[in-house]
Amino acid sequence: MYITTTIPYVNARPHLGHALELVQADALARHHRRRGEPVRFQTGTDDNSLKNVLAAEAEGVPVRELVDRNAAAFEGLRGTLDLSFDSFIRTSSHPGHRAGVERIWRATAHDLYQRHYEGLYCVGCEQFYPEGPCPDGHEAPLQLVSERNWFFRLSRYQDALLDLIRSGRLRIEPAARRNEVLAFVEAGLDDLSVSRSAARARGWGIPVPDDPGQVVYVWWDALANYVTALEGGDYDRWWVREPGKVHLMGKGVIRFHAVYWPAMLLSAGEPLPTAIFVHDYLTADGRKISKSSGNAADPVALVDAYGVDAVRWWLLREVPRVGDADFTEARLIARSDEDLANGLGNLVNRVATMVHRFLDGHVPPAGEPLAEVSGTVHEALEAFDFRRAAQGVWEIVEQANKYVERTRPWQQDPRGREASLGTLVHACRELAVQLEPFLPTAAVRVAAAVAGERLPRPRPLFRRLAG
């Protein structure tokens, strides 16, 4: 499976909304690797945006300095969030990206033409709108732009796109987002402006082939990363022959990925992605978390304060498949203490303590499994439902705790106690296996706590965060 995230602008440091998508993609990648499937997980940064140029101007630093600094912060989330991506592309510096963008441009030349255009432009979205204000909540007023641009004949691909989506060859989850895209395409597609004047872009970006007075529209440039990052044999392996090509994204950019990108690929004669998984927004006090809103929760600061397990678990356990999720630190703390410290950690330590008390730490033979959840977790992740998948893992904790209260090993005869504790140690070991895609660091600690023929002495696996 080829799993990709969107590549965010680097006009500022990453916020928790970026962490959500990265952690979701990481859990999906780890899950499929654990099943023995080949996986390539790719992310990166969109460096060639006018937003980045304006941010550098506002800060009084060269664009390259700002882009390099903020892109490094995004790449650094690998360690902060326990991410396992295989490839990180930066569109301003990846050696094959510009050539790849130029190749796609030339391959679509039969669908490109020039004309004058005038419209209202949102720098935050990097797109034109027929009227204001920005529908995605960017507060800066739309700019009236009048210039001669290159256009792509998007309208030519309306029927082909409808067939792709209706047939399921391009799968869009959840269904509400699929219906949204279908409604947009059915309403009729206008041709798309795919270049900007080099003067307005301050010379930053990829020049249009054979027309240096224009730069390639940043979205055309950015969408190409899914193939330009695949060099040599990787392109054939992961884009041509791979049967599962999954894009993860937020709902605000679905039109670019489910309409513009497939149309570009159809025009260029390229293979298409197979699935588009869409998440809604993280909010704070009901407002979308974003760089421009002033409510951008810093994932690095959150991990420093509460630990990576607490942050990853909140993102995967609390965020619904459909609907925005409102974040507060109090909610993160409560979920971590309830589930990780009081639930999972207490279960593992309780089991290990009883094994040491009654069996001198020696692990008895495994009994019958308490909960078979691998199928439930896989089914949930196939439907892009991380909260349901996390609940599937949690079923082991719930069933094990119920088993303890039902069997009460401390009151059983030695033979019954040994059988019960064997069942519980096996459940904790299975919990470590199933937990790994969600909390890889915690899974290692859980596995170590119940490893071997003689268990190590129990110790706290998670700290309580509430004061």
Image: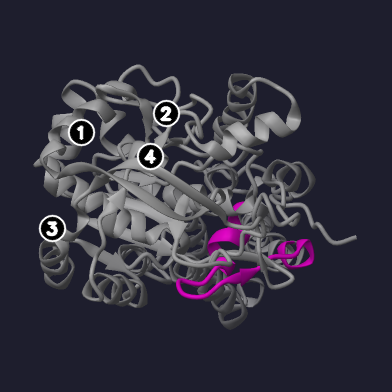
> Quick check: marks 4 and 2 in contact, CB under 8 Å?
no
Q: Position of residue 309 (x, y in %)?
A: 63, 50
> Could you say which disc has been placed on residue 104 in the image?
1
In this view, the residue in front, 384 or 380, is: 384
The image shows residue 104, relative to residue 69, as above or below, that is below
Foreground: 147 or 429?
147
Disc assigned to residue 217: 4
- Which mark sits nearer the N-terminus, 2 or 3? 2
Local SS, label 1:
helix
Residue 325 included in the magenta stretch of the image: yes
Vertical comparison of 384 with 143: above or below: below
Q: Are marks 2 and 1 in contact (CB under 8 Å)?
A: no
Q: Is residue 289 visible?
A: yes
Per the image, the residue denoted by label 3 is 156
Marks 3 and 4, how far apart in space?
Answer: 19 Å
Q: How far across and down, in percent of the image, does residue 439 sit?
A: 54, 50
Q: Amino acid at mark 3?
A: Arg
Mark on residue 91?
Answer: 2
Q: What's the CA distance linking mark 4 and mark 1? A: 13 Å
Whether residue 437 appears in this view of the structure is no
Kind of residue at disc 4: Tyr
Where are the magenta residues, as a range?
Answer: 312-332
User: Nearer the N terminus, badge 2 or badge 1?
Assistant: 2
